[in-house]
Amino acid sequence: MQQLPIDDAGPTQERLAKAGEYFQLVGRSRSSRRITMLDDPLGKAWMRQIIAATEYSALRRYALHWAAAGLQGPLNSVDLNRIYAFDPGQMSGLARTEAQLDHKRTYYAAKQAIGFRPSFVADQVACFGRGLQETGESLGLRSPYRARQKAAELLADAGHRLCAFFDALR
């Protein structure tokens, strides 16, 4: 059996340049070094200190439950001949495993616990990867500054409420 080479080189220089200052490096030696890319909107909000570390962690956990529940949609290729075709074997909308059902229940319970507007912003930023300004504009705010401020306020509120929700689950 041929052993595959281990890819422990980390991100390329181009990837690090694209991330700019939004990455976290832990460890000194090559074997213990871990690089976490934080150039998504949620990571940028944490690095810019818009949200606290505990709120970031709770929002990441919320997004993990969303993804593990299968709510992000399939990653299938597009077949233009079957766009509107119904396939009962796909079980669209149903949980395929018990673990997926547990994640779906946790996600919807968290969504209900934090309220409508905070959950909308949490979904947009943490799950869908939309920026704060774009999310604030979808709330109806016209000014880019006010849109960012309101979205940041609601994101921090959602993170705080999610911290309380996940602490209550323990």
Image: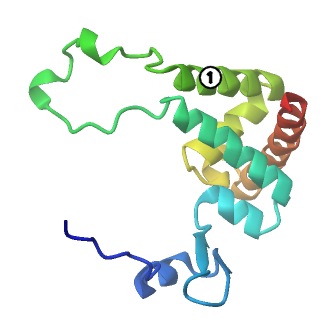
Looking at the picture, tell me which residue is in the foreground, 77 or 90: 90
- Left or right of 72 in this view: 161: right
Looking at the picture, tell me which residue is in the foreground, 80 or 74: 74
Mark 1, residues whose alpha carbon is within 10 Å: few (<14), some, or many (≥20)? some
Tag count: 1
Seen at 75% across and 27% down, the residue is: 110
Residue 60: x and y in percent read 68, 48
- Left or right of 32 in this view: 46: right
Seen at 47% across and 35% down, the residue is: 72
Residue 167: x and y in percent read 89, 36
**Res 53 seen here:** yes
Q: Picture quarter containing residue 154?
A: top right
Q: Which residue is mark 1?
A: 102
Seen at 37% across and 16% down, the residue is: 92
Q: Is residue 100 above or below residue 24?
A: above
List the single residue furthest toward the left: 81
